[in-house]
Amino acid sequence: MNNPLGILAGVIVCSVTLPIFLSVVSYDNIETNTSQKQEQLIETKSSQKYINYETIDKESPGINIYNHKTNKTEQMDIEEYLYGVLSGEMPSDFDIEALKAQAVAARTYVMYNQENKTSKHKGAAVCTDYTHCQEYKSYEELKESKGEDWIKDSYPIIKQAVDETKGHIITYDGEPILPLYFSTSSGKTENSEEVFSTEYPYLRSVDSPYDKYAPKYASTLKISNKDFVRKLKNTYSDINIIEDNLSSQIKILSRSDGGSVEKIKLGNKEVTGRDIRNILNLNSANFEIKFDTNSLDFVVKGYGHGVGMSQWGAQGMAEEGYKYYEILSHYYKDTIIKDLY
């Protein structure tokens, strides 16, 4: 017969050490499993964040471009054309994802014009004049204006942004959108119909918080009462307004969802914020007015018309880690990127 005291001692030792052993093993397993799950979550999140839209590999098409400098229509490979557009429309030191977003928007603009035949240049989809279509500079013009160092250091980045989005355009209901864009918002973009009268379902007012870091986010114009009244009377012959006590004669009546002045009353006349922007050459139609005895201060936020993609907003999103397709999806609501070639 075994020693009962020895058996009892063994039971006691096991009852004390076994829970400790199981606890240590369980803790190691939990820590290992948790670490593995976190790594898997990071991998999953990372893989979900990147989307490859490159599904078609065809030669890029040629397009007709009206060169306003030579007064001639030229045929050019669309991707080559986009090198010149991106070089003119966005700073080359912007983040690559912002540059990609701009490249896709510029490519979409060409396709929209071609499909809708909206170009006013006979036989050409677009022109090279930024006041009418998109900014474009040839390689030779870029070399002359920006210098050899820029060609060596920056031009490859421009080409990369275009090449890595080859054939990608923004679509709504399967068709290319009108991809309006501008420099700097006032913190929100504008609904298209509140600026250009035409409503587009994808050009909706959205938050654009990163613009506040842009160099032209805020500006001020000081103008004397005399000059202000003179400019108004030169524009509106039937306006009834005098230099004295302007604060009692001017009233902002309404604002858009994005914050721009929609309607403003000046004496006996009601005009739009865009009218005032044009008359005074303000950076945007989002302004406040501060009155002094003999002058007015127009305190302005943003730069540009405010509809579509804010370029500085895109830059801010890119710096925060957003991909080009996430930037485009934010500024152009309910759109889908399509690979044409």
Image (tube, rainbow, N blue to C red):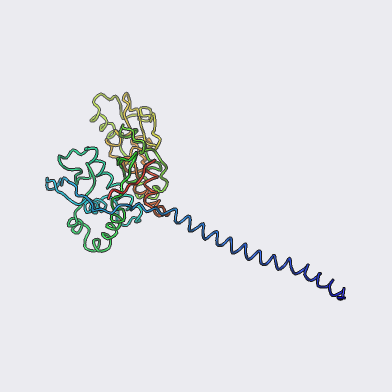
Name above or below for residue 181 compared with residue 293: below
267 or 169: nearer the eye?
169
Indicate the quadrant where residue 13 lies.
bottom right
228 or 259: nearer the eye?
259
Image location of residue 45, percent across then percent down:
48, 55
Q: Is residue 307 visible?
A: no
Relative horizontal placement of residue 124, taking residue 304 as reference (left or right): left
Image location of residue 55, percent across then percent down:
33, 52
User: Residue visible at 36% across and 46% down?
Assistant: 328
Image location of residue 68, percent across then percent down:
15, 45
User: Residue visible at 44% across and 56% down?
Assistant: 47
Relative horizontal placement of residue 123, taking residue 172 as reference (left or right): left
Can you say which quadrant of the picture contains the N terminus?
A: bottom right
Q: Is residue 261 visible?
A: yes
User: Residue visible at 23% across and 43% down?
Assistant: 133
188 or 225: nearer the eye?
188
Image location of residue 230, percent across then percent down:
25, 32
Name above or below for residue 322 compared with residue 123: below
Name above or below for residue 60 compared with residue 5: above
Q: How many marks?
A: 0
User: Residue visible at 51% across and 57% down?
Assistant: 41
